[in-house]
Image: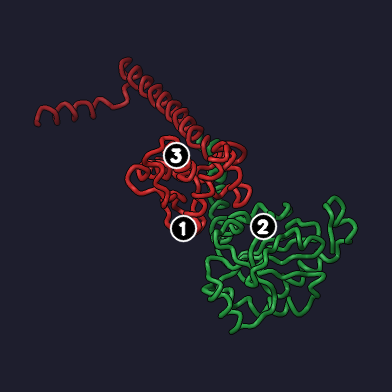
Amino acid sequence: MSAMRRWLPITLVLAFSFPATAVSQEGETARGTAAAQETEAPQTVEDDRSALTDPAEADLDARAAEVAGGLRCPVCRNQSILESNADLSREMHRVVRERLAAGETPEEVEAYFVSRYGEWILLKPQARGINLVVYALPVIVLLLGFLLARNRLRKWARAGAVETSAGATGSGSIGVEDEEWLRDALRES
Amino acid sequence: MKKKLRWLLPLVALPILWLLYWGMGRDTYVLPSPMAGLEAPEFHLVGFDGDTLSLADLRGRVVILNFWASWCIPCRTEHPVLVQTERTWDDSEVVLLGVVYQDSRANAERFLAQYGGEWTHVLDPSQRTAIDYGVYGVPETFFIGRDGHISHKKVGPVTWDLVRYQVDSLLAVPVSSANAGSVGGTP
């Protein structure tokens, strides 16, 4: 019971840190798979084969794919608009490409979609405001766990040191009878 | 030591419980729209009659912008409400405008022939207007004031109570103050 009590805070702290890590990595994995698809799957901005010959077009496609990989498909929810084949996603991908071609930065394109759909449209939460909790919490919790573990270990080590020093002076933690019993047991084995 | 750490249990448990309460108690399909209070994006869309309609043409009137499709079942649910909306207010005060989303003109017209309704509809074949308004499904309805600002966005079928409340609120805004700052508002 007391052992359970002792471990309860640590267990809770660990349990709490898991969802936070999962959330902060969600965007990362989505981006990762999007990047992986970039090379394999055909571009959603289809019909336009100029990218095969024109390096500038190919560069634009790549930049559009990078932005599109970070935008959530409003229909399918857990896919990026790069991966999704929904009509709306394809059109959004086209919007991304056109806005980049018109000279907007990737940040400006993202800001446009955020202004229309809310921050929800970003697969990876922005690292500011209340969102910082998601990024900071795993680190804080890990640090707290480390401090807690260090304090505990120190305390145990100190307790152990007291015991051994007490044993050396004669008034040992196990009595004379027990010590004899232990010696017998060791001899028999 | 154990007594000292007793405060840690509620400190850790309460946020988790709150998160569960908040997360399970909401409809995750409905997203909070950032567009309420903002100026409604301009559009130039072609109607069934071939004429191009812009939001600027409707400045000075309350506009109900309804994104819908004939394949959309909840759109059928809300259609009688829209019919009643059209009947209740005069076109010079309140304009109901349907935007056909991911659907053909023929299908839309068949739907309207079956369910009635005489208000204007425009087509959005590129879906650019839908994206401009942050639409992610149908039906979605925007209530736009005389000054061209969005007052409310409804995801899912509208109810008569909602429409009446929104339109009455928008009509209650004095015309002069609503038009202040707008360019050439012609009623």
Residue at (59%, 68%) from the top-left corner?
A: B100
Q: Nearer the viewer, residue A27 or A98?
A: A98
Q: Which chain is red?
A: A
Q: Is residue A36 left or right of residue A111?
A: left
Kindly identify the amino acid type of the residue bearing the numbered disc 2: Phe
On screen, B164 above or below A121? below
Name which of mark 1 and mark 3 comes first in the sequence. 3
- Image coords of residue B53 (percent x, y): 69, 63
Q: Is residue B124 left or right of residue B143?
A: left
Q: How many neighbours does mark 1 have within 10 angstroms: few (below 14), some (14-19), or many (20 or more)?
A: some
Circle 3 — which element?
helix
Circle 2 — which element?
loop
- Residue under label 2, please give it: B43
- Residue under label 1, please give it: A76
Q: CA distance from mark 1 to mark 2?
A: 26 Å
Q: How many neighbours does mark 3 have within 10 angstroms: few (below 14), some (14-19), or many (20 or more)?
A: some
Q: In this orientation, does residue A29 appear?
A: no
Q: Chain of mark 1?
A: A
- Residue under label 3, please give it: A57
Q: Nearer the viewer, residue A16 or A51?
A: A51
